[in-house]
Image (spheres, rainbow, N blue to C red):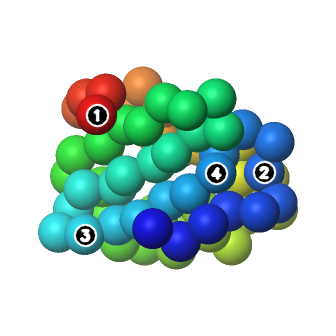
Amino acid sequence: MPTISDSDNLSAAEWADGVLSIDFKKGLSYEFYDVPIGLYHELLAAPSKNTFFVQNIKGKFTYARV
């Protein structure tokens, strides 16, 4: 899973077949379902990954803790 080094909260993110997998630095991992690939690319390019996550992903997609 690609590492996110410039975030205080997110440690890694990966997208495959509409599933966005995110690892958090506190050790939790979640999968978000039906996420467009473009949103994944925007997350990786965002100046603040955590702000982008909160504004555009958290609470907007079905998810599960893994």
In this picture, residue 60 sits left or right of residue 57: left
Q: Residue 30: image x %, image y %?
A: 37, 37
Q: Would you say residue 52 is visible in this rendering?
A: no
User: Is disc 4 placed on a helix, strand or loop?
Assistant: strand
- Whichever of callouts 2 and 3 sits on the residue coming sooner in the sequence is 2
- Kindly identify which residue carries mark 2: 7
Q: Residue 14: image x %, image y %?
A: 41, 65
> The N terminus lies in which quarter of the figure?
bottom left
Residue in the image at 81% along x and 42% along y:
8
- Whichever of callouts 3 and 4 sits on the residue coming sooner in the sequence is 4
Among the 4 quarters of the image, the one containing residue 15: bottom left
- Kindly identify which residue carries mark 4: 11
Q: Circle 4: is it few (<14), some (14-19), or many (20+) Cα within 10 Å?
A: many
- Whichever of callouts 1 and 4 sits on the residue coming sooner in the sequence is 4
Mark 1 residue type: Val
In this picture, residue 24 sits left or right of residue 18: right
User: Is disc 3 placed on a helix, strand or loop?
Assistant: strand
- Kindly identify which residue carries mark 1: 66
Mark 2 residue type: Ser
Q: Are marks 4 and 2 in contact (CB under 8 Å)?
A: yes
> The C terminus lies in which quarter of the figure?
top left
**Residue mark closest to the camera, 4 vs 2:** 4
Q: Circle 2: is it few (<14), some (14-19), or many (20+) Cα within 10 Å?
A: some
How far apart in space, not on screen, are marks 1 and 4 (Cα)?
A: 15 Å
Q: Is residue 40 above or below residue 65?
A: below
Q: Residue 20: image x %, image y %?
A: 34, 55
- Kindly identify which residue carries mark 3: 16
Of residues 37 and 9, which is closer to you in this image?
9
In this picture, residue 46 sits left or right of residue 47: left
User: Is disc 2 placed on a helix, strand or loop?
Assistant: loop
How far apart in space, not on screen, are marks 3 and 1 (Cα)?
A: 15 Å
